[in-house]
Amino acid sequence: MNKKIAFILGSVFFVLGLITLPHYGINWDTVNHLPRGQAYLRYLTTGKKDYSDLKRYFYDWRNRDQWYWQKSQSLLIDANLPAVKVPTRSMYQLDSYTYNDYIEHDGNGHPPLSDILSSAFNRILFGKLKLINDIDSYRVYGIFLSACLVGLLYHWLSKIYGKVAGFFASLSLSLYPLFWAESHFNTEKDIPETVFWSFFLYSIWKGVKEKSVKWILLSGIFFGLALGTKFNILFSILVIIPWILFLIVFRKLKISETLKNAFWGIMAFLIGLGLFIGTWPYLWADPISRIIGVLNFYKGIGASGGNTVNWYPLQWITYTTPLVILFLFIIGLGFAVHRIIKEKDDLPLLFLLWLVVPILREVAPGASFYGGVRQIMEYVPAMAIVAGLGAQAVYNKFPRKLTTTFLLLAFMPITLKLISIHPNENVYFNPLIGGLSGAKKANIPYWGFSFGSAYRQGVNWLNTNAEKDAQIVYVYELIPNFPRLWLRPDLILHNNGRSGYLRKGEYAITLTYQGLEKRSYYDMYLNKFIKPVYEAKVDGVAILNIWKNDNEHLISPWKEEKIKNVILIPTQTGLKFDLGNAYSLSRLEITYNNLDCPKLTSGYVEVSADEKSWERLPGVLPEDWRISAMGEQPKDGKFIEPFVGQMARYVHVSLTPEDTCLKSIKDFDFYALTP
């Protein structure tokens, strides 16, 4: 019965996850993972090192009406072509990224095993069976693994502590916003690592408690799967060793038994290491030095060089964990400590070590972080387990029917909340901080960080609302951040359409989160002057915006005038302009001599109202990032620097080299915005 209920709970999670899968976009790291997964999978299964035998997958700009378009709101293959003409080659089977490219240059990143496994799901569900579309078929891998973990938690806890503990542990995991959301699209790194870490610890526990060599050896498989996904699993040794020592001291585990377990543990490690090396062809030529290179990569991304304790992970977990789970976790923490101290129960200790070690790794001085705590998501199942223990403690203390009803009702608010913010659960903040709006007000680092998932909502809006042949651009991001095949064939996606104050009518899309206020001229221009045509909001806070950059959507009329009597002051480092008074700046236009002088190698612009405090504007010259439609600036004797209404009297243009052409000014004009 225990296994049946575990299977049912896992199946419910899987079905719900599958149904909601097309509501989520891709992780913006996808383009760095899936082409590699496909290249390695193809070599490991066929021995082929490229895609020369497959029909080429490309877009002909002259015949956009013939492009393959997968309807972005559908899980199944729902295209603008007849089913027999839908290509079975994935868009991530790229001719420009083949086995030959990765076999020599693949050490500066995470291992590829989950890239390979998710690609296998794609090849079966899309390439062979034609059941699920090209993009979502990869992510079934994450939903499947997550569902297995939901079932495991029930099976493990219900067998030891009771069905209530098992059920509410599984429920807490399923409704943990970060876990639910990321199970849909973070399927190359953090979700698989979390699942394999959990099954690894379960296998170790099972093997030691039941004196089972088979379970210990099986743990080696899960260790290899985890190691082949991320190196986080190496920190599990800090969980296992203290737990084993506790067994020796308090549970009288025999030294002979410990030595036996250690021997088979080494064998399990070797199995895992073999799986890790065997599924990463890059390592085959020189395993030792290349593994050292990967370790250096992890050292580089895992250490910030600081020497202070980083409390941010604890803050983030406190503010992003649903209150009911926090409440049950606190009770469960007391229950676990009591069992450890009074009854010398080793399993709660294993759970607490499992919880604490990943978090301490990020709290420790010198640790780096970004984007919340998804990199240490291994703590989530442990937290859910402790919450399950808390539910069991409450159940054992009070009348059982009443308590069961109370516990179920206590999970209703978070269930309804997640439904209301779906599919943006990974930007959830709890009432302790006032939701996402409170997190924004408090300027919590990385509030609103959706890791690319929210793009799909914007694509859906564009497909429905954008006029034929409309120009689509990212405000700042890169083209692969959402798959081109989601977008209507007639829509033109290219970042050279950014027109800024020229207002040529392009649709500009971007994710919105903490820290973007002054990321680029285009960000500042759109936010200040153009009304959004679409916003994906959570708690009243936009996490994705789309603007139509035209006169119709101006927030207020665009009026400007030429500033007179501007004084140009050449300096050793560049050009300084004194406008005489402070103005709301619009743009600077320069014509210059571009003959017999060195071109600009680097430069930037800064403004000041008092010549004491200077504000550097975003971007580095020369570039075409500010207004792509105008081309690179400066170029061919002309230079235009756009502003966004900064109040300034002084403008300084820093130039390298000092005698660059831009310094040989023929003429210039300054423009200011007027009320």
Image (cartoon, rainbow, N blue to C red):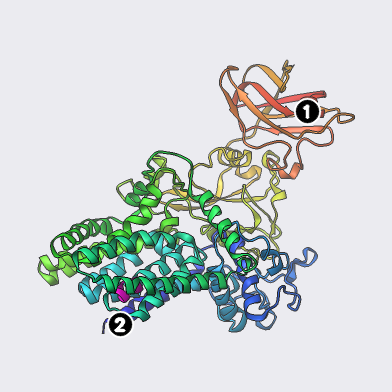
- Residue in the image at 43% along x and 63% along y: 233
Instruction: Report the front residue among 661 and 385.
Output: 385
Q: Position of residue 79 (x, y in %)?
A: 63, 74
Could you say where residue 65 lies in the image, as x and y percent from the top left?
74, 69
Residue on which the image places disc 1: 590
Decide whether the magenta segment is chiefly helix, strand or loop. Answer: helix
How packed mark 1 is, by other alpha carbons closer than 10 Å (few <14, some 14-19, many 20 or more), is some
> Which disc number belongs to residue 296?
none
The residue closer to the viewer here, 137 or 530, is: 137
The kind of residue tagged 2 is Lys
The residue singled out by tag 2 in the image is 3
Residue at the image point whose x is 25% and y is 62% from the top: 349
- Quadrant of residue 574 in the image? top right
Residue 600, position in %: x, y? 77, 33
Residue 451 versus residue 486 in the image, above or below? above
For image coordinates 30% across by 59% down, the residue present is: 353
In magenta stretch: residue 205: yes
Whether residue 412 is visible here, answered yes or no, is no
Q: Is residue 416 left or right of residue 544?
A: left
Give the magenta part as a residue range.
202-208
Give the mark, 2 or 1, whose residue is nearer the N terminus. Answer: 2
Q: Is residue 468 left or right of residue 185?
A: right
Report whether residue 66 is seen. yes
- The x, y position of residue 243, in whole percent, is 28, 63
User: Element at badge 2?
Assistant: helix
Q: Residues within 10 Å of mark 2 (few under 14, many from 20)?
A: some
Above or below 28: residue 267: below
Q: Could you give the CA–CA distance between mark 2 and mark 1, rounded to whole angstroms?
A: 75 Å
Q: Residue furthest front?
A: 256
